Image (cartoon, grey):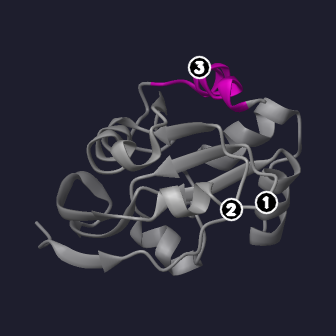
Amino acid sequence: MAELGLVYHEIPPLWAPDSRVLILGSIPSPRSRETGFYYGHPRNRFWKTVAAVFGEAVPETIEEKKALMLKHRLALWDVLQSCYIRGASDGSIKDPVPNDIRGLMGKTEISRIFTTGEKADRLYMKLVYQSTGLRSERLPSTSPANCAVSDAELVRAYERIII
């Protein structure tokens, strides 16, 4: 079993001044850190799901992914700035330090926050909610490890991000 390693969030948040919805993961996975952008694992269903929600083509490049999000006034970031974690296992997170989500909100029109998975939601509510006063709405994880949720169920759940 791999040891816990200290991970710093190095991917900047994706946002625009007119962003109205913020989608938060926990912290970028090793694959996302390699690719330099969110939900970088090829089997992660995030991009396929968001594209389906808006009736768009699945984005392939980072630029296409950014354009899809910004077109629909969505911002994307993670709850944590740093933590100790084993691989991509959210369940192993120790010593979490949150990102300045309140600061990001002050630059945007964000009025709703969604979290992608149970751990991201718990971390947000424990570490960030008091500073923002805005409760998170939990969405199912799009991770390949969450195979209990079908593609159709993901799309239905993620339709809540439409503003």
Residue at image location 71% in from the left, 61% down from the top: 15
Q: Camera-side residue: 57 or 26?
A: 26
Residues at marks 3 and 1, CA–CA distance in whole angstroms: 31 Å
Does residue 157 show up? yes
Find disc 1 in the rendering and name its residue: 17
Where is residue 136 shown, x and y percent of the image? 47, 34
User: Are the residues tagged 3 and 1 within 8 Å (C-beta)?
Assistant: no
Residues at marks 3 and 2, CA–CA distance in whole angstroms: 33 Å
- Which mark's residue is nearer the viewer, 3 or 1? 1
**Could you classify mark 3 by the number of other residues whose Cα lies within 10 Å: few (under 14), some (14-19), or many (20 or more)?**
few
Residue at image location 60% in from the left, 54% down from the top: 105
Amino acid on which disc 2 is placed? Lys
Residue interval drawn in magenta? 149-161
Image mark for residue 153: 3
Image mark for residue 158: none
Amino acid on which disc 3 is placed? Glu
User: Are the residues tagged 2 and 1 within 8 Å (C-beta)?
Assistant: yes
Residue 67 in the magenta stretch? The answer is no
Residue 160 in the magenta stretch? The answer is yes
From the image, give the main secondary structure of the stretch colored magenta.
Answer: helix
